[in-house]
Amino acid sequence: VLTSAGRLGVNDSSPQGVLHVTSDSTTVDALYIESNEDSSSAAPVVTLHRHSASPADADYLGQLKFKGENDADQEVVYAKITAKIQDASDGTEDGLIEFANRKAGSNAITARLRSDSLQLLNDTSLALKSDGAQLQFGNDNDMQIYHNGSNGEINNATGNFTIDSAGEITLDADGAVIRLKDGGTEFGKISQNS
């Protein structure tokens, strides 16, 4: 249906957008885009282009919203992905993508993927819960943080720092020393018994 306002509805007589596709099927895709081109180039491609006469840092470029209802039959945006201009300067352009989630009844930006960093925001934690999950830092895994099956461990090439299930802390390394510093000045240390 094409309305007088220039809106096109597919299976919908009152389209809410320029193009409104309605489907009551969970087995057939509401939108299916296919390419038959057989090279290694990217295809099919969907482009979202924000044309602006005055582009500026922090401008929104496009957004994907994921809506549903709550148990009071109210429409709610539960999650969204937003692209933004981080730096609009000619020759040093940067972009970012923000991820927002519904959190305790309000929308919150939970992660921001910038051109230079991944930021977890608004009390969003990083959780690895599969067997053998690890956080590794440095090109040669200079430091690892992981769970060994019963204890949490932080280690590098010189030793392990372990917190067991009873909350006991163990420093395991030859000649291991914990140095206490204030502003770079050492005022005490804890070393293992010889």
Image: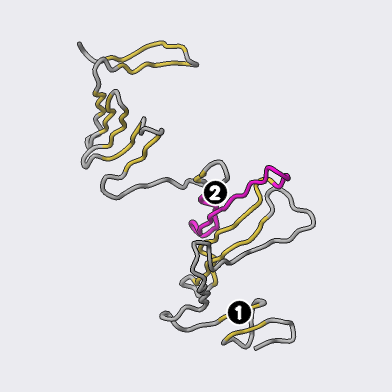
Query: Alpha carbon of mark 2 to alpha carbon of mark 1: how far?
Result: 30 Å
**Residue 105 is covered by the magenta coloring:** yes
| Number of numbered discs overlaid on the protein picture | 2
Q: Amino acid at mark 1?
A: His
Q: Which residues are magenta?
A: 88-113
Q: Upstream in the sequence, badge 2 or badge 1?
A: 1
Q: Is residue 5 above or below residue 103?
A: below
**Circle 2 residue:** 112
Helix, strand or loop at label 2? It is strand
Helix, strand or loop at label 1? It is strand
The answer to whether 151 appears left or right of 185 in the picture is left
The answer to whether 19 appears left or right of 151 in the picture is right
Q: Nearer the viewer, residue 144 or 39?
A: 39
**Residue 3 is covered by the magenta coloring:** no
**Circle 1 residue:** 20
Give me the residue at 70% from left, 43% from top.
91
Give me the residue at 50% from left, 83% from top.
23
